[in-house]
Image (cartoon, grey):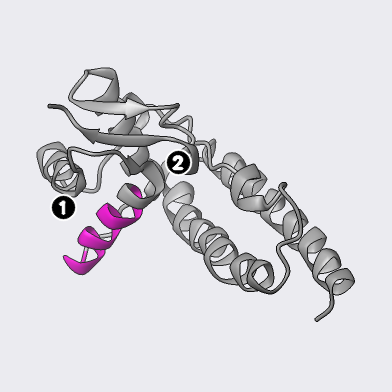
C-alpha cells in the first residue's frame, strides 16, 4: 500500500471508529439488558480497530501527528448508582479484582478495565466494561485509588493504588 492508499484507509477507519464511539455512547442510555447485550461486542470491535487495523496501517505509514490513538477516547458517563451487578458478582469481588490489577505506579484505565473483564470472563462471568468503569469512577470518587486525568476517558487517564 502506498501513502495515498494508507491515507484513504485511515480516513475510512476514522469514520468507523467515530461511529463506534457514537454507538457506545447511545447504548449507555439503553435499559440495562440491552446495554449488556451490546456494550461488550462494540468495545471489542473498537479495541480491535485500534489494536489491530490502525496499528498495521500506521506501522507501514506513520501518516501524521493526528493519529487516531491520540484522538479517540472512550467516555463512559455511567454512574455507580445506575449499575445493577449480575447476581454472580458482588461489589466486594469487583473491588478486589480491580485493586488486584492496580500497581503503585499509574496504569491506563483502559488496560485495567480490560484486565478486570478478562478475570471475570475466565471465571465464567460476564461483566460490561462500562460497569467496571463506573466502579473505578466510584473508587476514585471515594478516594480509594489515585487517578490521573478524567477516568471516564479510558485511554487518556490512569489510575494507581493509593500509597
**Location of residue 69 in the rendering, given as x and y in whole percent from the top left corner:** 60, 51
Q: Is residue 46 positioned above or below 34 on the image?
A: below
What residue is rendered at 52% in x and 36% in y? 75
Point 40% across, 48% down: residue = 110
Residue 118 belongs to magenta span: yes
Q: Relative to 28, does residue 54 appear above or below in the rendering?
A: below
Is residue 104 in the magenta section? no
116 left or right, relative to 63? left
Task: Classify residue 149 by image quadrant.
Answer: top left
Which residue reaches farthest right?
A: 4
The image quarter in which residue 103 lies: top left
Quadrant of res 3: bottom right
Secondary structure beneath label 2: helix
Q: Left or right of 99: which side holds 139?
A: right
- Which of the marked residues, 2 or 1, is nearer the chain's N terminus? 1
Decide: few, some or many residues near mark 1? Use Cα within 10 Å; few <14, some 14-19, many ≥20. Answer: few
Q: Is residue 131 visible?
A: no
Q: Position of residue 132 (x, y in %)?
A: 31, 43
Residue range of the region highlighted in magenta in the rendering: 113-124
Please tell me the numbered disc located at residue 9: none
Question: Could you tell me if the residues under marks 2 and 1 are in contact, i.e. CB atoms within 8 Å?
Answer: no
**Direction top: furthest residue:** 142
Amino acid at each position: 500500500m502506498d501513502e495515498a492508499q494508507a491515507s484513504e484507509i485511515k480516513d475510512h477507519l476514522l469514520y468507523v471508529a467515530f461511529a463506534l464511539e457514537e454507538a457506545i455512547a447511545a447504548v449507555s442510555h439503553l435499559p440495562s439488558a440491552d446495554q449488556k447485550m451490546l456494550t461488550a461486542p462494540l468495545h471489542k470491535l473498537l479495541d480491535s480497530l485500534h489494536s489491530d487495523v490502525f496499528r498495521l496501517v500506521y506501522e507501514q505509514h506513520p501518516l501524521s501527528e493526528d493519529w487516531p490513538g491520540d484522538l479517540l477516547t472512550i467516555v463512559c458517563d455511567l454512574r455507580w448508582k445506575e449499575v445493577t451487578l449480575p447476581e454472580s458478582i458482588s461489589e466486594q469481588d469487583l473491588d478486589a479484582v480491580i485493586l488486584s490489577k492496580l500497581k503503585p505506579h499509574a496504569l491506563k484505565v483502559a488496560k485495567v478495565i480490560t484486565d478486570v473483564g478478562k478475570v471475570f470472563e475466565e471465571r465464567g462471568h460476564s461483566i460490561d466494561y462500562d460497569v467496571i468503569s463506573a466502579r473505578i469512577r466510584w473508587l476514585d470518587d471515594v478516594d480509594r485509588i489515585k487517578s490521573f486525568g478524567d477516568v471516564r476517558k479510558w485511554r487518556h487517564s490512569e489510575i494507581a493504588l493509593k500509597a
